[in-house]
């Protein structure tokens, strides 16, 4: 996780800040540049694979019963 966050931070897609309520925590925030990247990336995925909203999400897969 740390490596992925470091890489995204190096690209300027996110930033870290201390949680003022609990200084043990570090909050991760998406930057405007990160939001633009995510939007463009989502468009490319949709062009390549169609509407991904029709596919089960990870959250719904977790709720499927096991056989």
Image: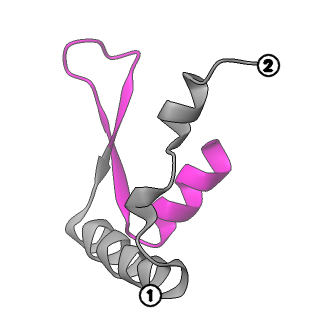
Q: Position of residue 37 (x, y in %)?
A: 35, 76
Q: CA distance from mark 1 to mark 2?
A: 34 Å
Percent across and percent down for residue 45 are: 48, 78
Q: Quadrant of the C terminus?
A: top right
Q: Which residues are magenta?
A: 1-28
Residue at 34% across, 53% down = 15
Q: What residue would you read off at disc 2?
A: 67
Which dot marks residue 47? 1
Task: Return the x and y of residue 33 as percentages of the image width and height.
Answer: 27, 73
Mark 2, Cα crowd under 10 Å, few <14 / some 14-19 / many 20+, is few
Camera-side residue: 27 or 62?
A: 62
Q: Residue at x 46, y 73 (%)?
A: 11
Give residue 66's quadrant in the image: top right
What secondary structure is marked by label 1? Answer: helix
Is residue 28 placed above or below 6 in the rendered structure? Answer: above
Q: Residue at x 20, y 68 (%)?
A: 32
In the image, is residue 16 part of the stretch drawn in magenta?
yes
Measured along the vertical axis of the image, is residue 7 above or below residue 20? below
Residue 18 position (above or below residue 22):
below
Instruction: Please tell me which of labels 1 and 2 falls first in the chain.
Output: 1
Q: Quadrant of residue 28?
A: top left
């Amino acid at each position: 996780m740390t490596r992925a966050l470091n890489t995204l931070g190096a690209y300027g897609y996110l930033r870290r800040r201390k949680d003022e309520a609990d200084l043990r925590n570090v909050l991760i925030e998406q930057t405007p540049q990160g939001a633009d990247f995510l939007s463009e990336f989502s468009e490319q995925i949709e062009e390549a694979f169609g509407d991904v909203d029709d596919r089960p999400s990870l959250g719904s897969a977790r709720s499927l019963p096991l056989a």
